[in-house]
Image (cartoon, rainbow, N blue to C red):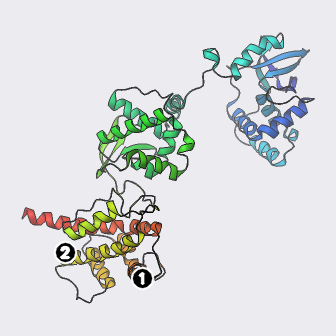
Amino acid sequence: MKKDINIKNLIVNPENYRFDPVDNQGEAINLMLEEKGAEIFNLANHIFEHGLDQAKDSRILEIKKNLFLILDGNRRATAIKCLQNPSLIKDSSLRVRFSKISKGKGSIPDEVNCFVYKNEVEAAEWIRLDHTGKNKGIGQDPWEPASKDRFDYKFGGKISPAVQIINLFEHETKHKLKTKTLKISTVNRILSNPESRSYLGIDIRNGKIILVAPKKEIIKRLDQLFNKIIADNVAVKEVYHVPDSIKFMEELFSDKPKFTKTATIVSPKGYVQKRGVQIKKSFPKSTSRKTLIPKECILEIDKDKINNIYRELRDDLLLDGSLKATPNAVGVLFRVFLEVSLDYYLSKKIGKLLPQNATINQKIDAVTKYMEKNKIADSNQLSPIRTVSSSKTKDILHIQRFHEYVHSTTIEPESSSLKTKWNNLQEFFEILWEEISKNKKQKRKT
């Protein structure tokens, strides 16, 4: 029988199935708060703001006239009783938090919608089905993560990156994925850091997936990723930490796709929303890569020797902490690459070399002044390279550090510091070589 019962006439069950039995309602409430205090607080907050779910009755048993024992719904009753009387709460900090709830916008229910059973056995079957899972389809069937995401998108406008790329994959391939076997939490964890998702050729902006590589290549890589997760049953704990996630993607793909100069925005439902979006940077830089120069850093260098140095630093010489790593060679060659790039730019763009005995600091000064004067780069873009030649001798970028790689008999460069230096100077090198390449293309046209 359905009935609305005043909360004062409801007894929190001392034999709540969640815990070992206690002697009375007071002890039952205390035990509930000790074990699930934070959850009860959140539930109380929700009840205060939204009220009770009228479609879900508390299951109760009348033990004497107008006095009812709660069989199922003890958490709700505990939350309401503590809202009405915070002094029931022993923990002072939790008591203060409960007291603050009633100062907000909402109301504390006096009555609870209930279903009164004739005896406990009659209620037992339904309580069991509510709390023990699917039971071969008889009980409640919890939503898988993808189902939850779709619900959240319909009513909250939010959908996780994992489900967005699944929608993209299904839209493009017309193939429905079995999301029960594809662990959504694992995919979301991989997508949570920019270095890992760069192996797929995607990024995330304002909660939306954007494609920064050819769509066909991205779909191919998504297929490979999904098959791997399903076949190996990859759990989220295996990719939970960023280094593990990056290692997983490196081993799966070995290299990154060729990135496009513009991005494509994808709607949460998986279809292309906008093409040709300009992006300044595809991904935040990382020092987790294996080489000095990231694979996605493409420099068009028409001078064979300089191009060979660039390719060795990008493709061949390792900085991965293994026995094959060559930080000393990379440090020396990095220093060489910096100076020959400056020399070549001076000869091609400014039209003359500085005196033969010019220092690298003088070369940096000449190049940066020319770039700024001709609006090729602004002061912010030139700040890192100017630090190399500045008076800040303790700075990691200072030229003194580069000199030590060549001349010091004791100082050895660390892989991470070398990659950090490149991260700071990459934009300068990109601007420098793009200008040289542009100048060459213009000459071809004339």
Residue placed under numbered mark 2 in the picture: 349
Residue at x-position 55% and y-position 41%: 236
Q: How many marks can you see?
A: 2
Amino acid bearing label 2: Lys
Residue at the extreme left of the image, as rendered: 446
User: Quick one: quadrant of the C terminus?
Assistant: bottom left
Q: Is residue 208 visible?
A: yes
**Left or right of 1 in this view: 200:** left
- The image quarter containing residue 421 is bottom left
Image coordinates of residue 120 in percent, x first then y, are: 83, 14
Q: Is residue 148 above or below residue 114?
A: below
Name which quarter of the figure residue 328 lies in.
Answer: bottom left
Does residue 269 appear in this view? no
Q: Nearer the viewer, mark 2 or mark 1?
A: 1
Q: Quadrant of the N terminus?
A: top right
- Residue 370 percent across, percent down from the top left: 25, 77
On screen, residue 273 versus residue 92, left or right, reads left
Residue 95 vs 317, above or below: the answer is above
**Closest to the observer, 328 or 69:** 328
Name the residue nearer the viewer: 207 or 178: 178
Q: Secondary structure at mark 2?
A: helix
* Tag 1 residue: 400
Distance of label 2 from label 1 (alpha carbons): 27 Å
